Image (cartoon, helix red, strand yellow):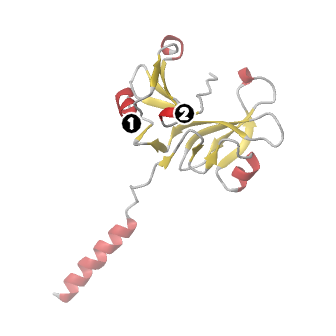
Amino acid sequence: MRTLLAATLLLTLGLAAAAPATTGSAVRFTGKRAGDVRIGDTFRKLRDAGRLGPIKPGCELAGPNVRSAKLKAPLRGFVDLTTTTPRRVRSITLTGGARARGVGIGSTIRQIRAAFPGARLDHGTDDTLGVTLVKVPRNRGGRFHFGVSTMTNKTTVIGIPTIAFCE
């Protein structure tokens, strides 16, 4: 009986240690940051800390000498950098791995408005880009935008402070 109890206990402990942690898997974002990546941080600081990938050319539509870098796990997306030296984070675009007040990628407009009652809808990009913008102003809990697909009615992109459309 003791060996069966000991074996059951060891098996339970082993399975609990092997199970991935589901709580806290999504990083928190605000109007000034996403996890450890803040607006205004230098590229070198974030690259040395392992938060960003290598610097690459940015959107051609934004002008010459524009650069961006991919975010590293647990965040998904990219940052746009300033054109001045040293290069600093100008905006953060999230495509996964972050939540604010329980909403993130995959959330609906109803869920966003429940979490951020002061959020405003902008349907100006519905036809051209296929995305409804939900703006959360600074005095209502953020300074960021949710991009909600008009096809799926789910959030596909989050921009801090705005969404950088390029394509």
Across and down, in percent, residue 143 comes to 55, 33
Across and down, in percent, residue 125 comes to 52, 15
Q: Is residue 66 above or below residue 27?
A: above
**Mark carried by residue 115:** 1
Q: Nearer the viewer, mark 2 or mark 1?
A: 2
Which three-letter amino acid code belongs to the residue tagged 2? Arg
Which three-letter amino acid code belongs to the residue tagged 1? Ala
Q: Is residue 126 above or below residue 12?
A: above
Q: Are marks 2 and 1 in contact (CB under 8 Å)?
A: no
Q: Residue at x 76, y 30 (%)?
A: 66
**Which corner quadrant holds the C terminus?**
top right
SS of the residue at dot 2? Answer: helix
Across and down, in percent, residue 104 comes to 44, 38
Q: In the shown orientation, is residue 65 left or right of residue 140?
A: right
**Mark carried by residue 19:** none
Out of 93 and 19, give the one closest to the viewer.
93
Q: Residue at x 39, y 30 (%)?
A: 117
Q: Residue furthest left?
A: 1
Of labels 2 and 1, earlier in sequence is: 1
Out of 122 and 72, give the one closest to the viewer.
122
Q: Residue furthest bottom?
A: 2
SS of the residue at dot 1? Answer: helix
**Mark carried by residue 138:** 2
